[in-house]
Amino acid sequence: MKIHKESVTSFCFLNSDGKNILSKNANLPVIPASNMKLITSLCALESLGREFVFTTNFSSDKDNLHITGDPSFFLNIGECRRIIRELQIEKVNAIYLEKPRIDREFYNSDWIYGDSKYSYQPRISNFFIGENCKIKNSSKFDDNDFNYIHQNEKLFQPVKNPDKHLIEAFSEEKNLRTIRKSLSSNNNFEKVISHSANIRDVLRHILFESCNFYTEVIFKYLSSSEKSLGTWENSSKFVMDYISRINGSENVRIKDGSGLSRENFLTTGFLSNMLLYAKKNFGNTFIELMPKIGQGTLRKRLISLEKNGIYAKTGTLSGVSALSGYISSMDTFFSIIINNSLDEGAVRQMEIDRILSAFIDKYK
């Protein structure tokens, strides 16, 4: 089945020396959809460091629970119960949310409501449990593996009040007080329980399951400091400065971290070069954060090409499909993006897979 003639197809294949093997419209600005996550992830890995650990601290003042610091990636109901036990809190009286690293703007102003089906649109916050979503028509907390949410998105819905949702994970009391304190809070507690997440585990989850929520949290975190909260606006500038230093920013515009915004523009030449940069500077560390065929968002895709050792990130919005990654058997970096398409997503995906397969057949 041929793709609609009005569609715009762009692709770029580079060898390990940066030589252009095959390309079409490689310098044309296109909407990258979730391929934007590759840029956010690489910027985070290099800016924060490959051994960086996000740490959220929990402490108690009598029966008051204090939550402080970094975003609470991978916090689940079992971990919440462990924290309460170790702090020896019999009944939570109030919860203090202190020293967050990102602001409380839940939604990016450049997002379009119609695209919410591509992420179930959870509210973006600093402290959270279960990616700020819950099982539909249920008051119980989901205690499945975090990948389960993305493999069964139709079962989940965003929570309306992230603070309230987090509080209910620590107490059955429905009307607890939530108190937010400034960045300058300086409480000293005898006992502090830490919940931590390694950056590589967070980025692997982002790239394997195309997790918009974690991506936007880490994107905003990039522009945070001890004295100022991270914001979308400041993080857009931060990431643009980063890519300007390492690869140039011509024909590039960045408005969010996950690719939900249709105001993002990249080129396939840029994406291929960024993946080449990642391989040269991080070896396989960054490449292996992406899923291989049979894993993550590639679990049912490109099966006939599995022997080629392909690592790749998918991307989808209405009218947009993307696939960028690395062919290890050919030491080749690629990016393929289709924009402005009236075809169904399955048709666009088949065309991208055809382009990739034809390239391997011809050049291997």
Image (cartoon, helix red, strand yellow):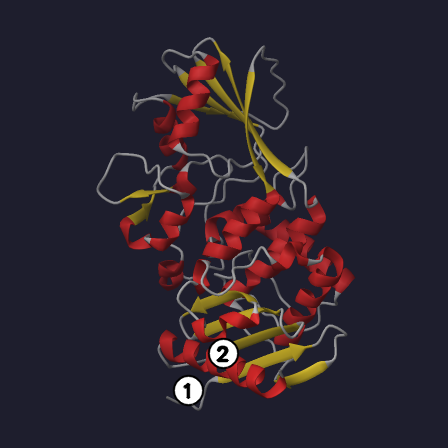
Which one is nearer the viewer's eye here, 122 or 246? 246
Which picture quadrant has residue 88?
Answer: top left
Q: CA distance from mark 2 to mark 1?
A: 10 Å
For the N terminus, the image quarter is: bottom left
Whether residue 11 is situated above or below residue 92 in the rendered picture: below
Which picture quadrant has residue 201?
Answer: top right
Residue at 61% from the left image edge and 39% from the top image edge? 229
Which picture quadrant has residue 324?
Answer: bottom right
Q: Amino acid at mark 2?
A: Ile
Residue at 35% from the left image edge and 41% from the top image edge? 144
The local secondary structure at tag 2 comes to: strand
x, y (%) of residue 25? Answer: 61, 84
User: Badge 1, how many Cα within 10 Å: few under 14, some, many 20+?
Assistant: some
Observer able to see residue 231: no
Q: Amino acid at mark 1?
A: Ile
Whether residue 342 is situated above or below residue 140 in the rendered picture: below
Query: From the viewer's perspective, is 153 left or right of 307?
Result: left
* CB within 8 Å, label 2 to label 1: yes
Residue bearing the label numbered 1: 3
Which one is nearer the viewer's eye here, 5 or 364? 364
Query: From the viewer's perspective, is 221 left or right of 211?
Result: right
Whether residue 86 is situated above or below residue 16 in the rendered picture: above
Residue at 42% from the left image edge and 12% from the top image edge? 89
x, y (%) of residue 23? Answer: 63, 84
Of the numbered discs 2 and 1, the one sitting upstream in the chain is 1
Which one is nearer the viewer's eye here, 350 or 267? 350
Query: From the viewer's perspective, is 279 left or right of 298?
Result: right
Q: Residue furthest front?
A: 307
x, y (%) of residue 248? Answer: 74, 68
The disc label shown at residue 338, or none: 2
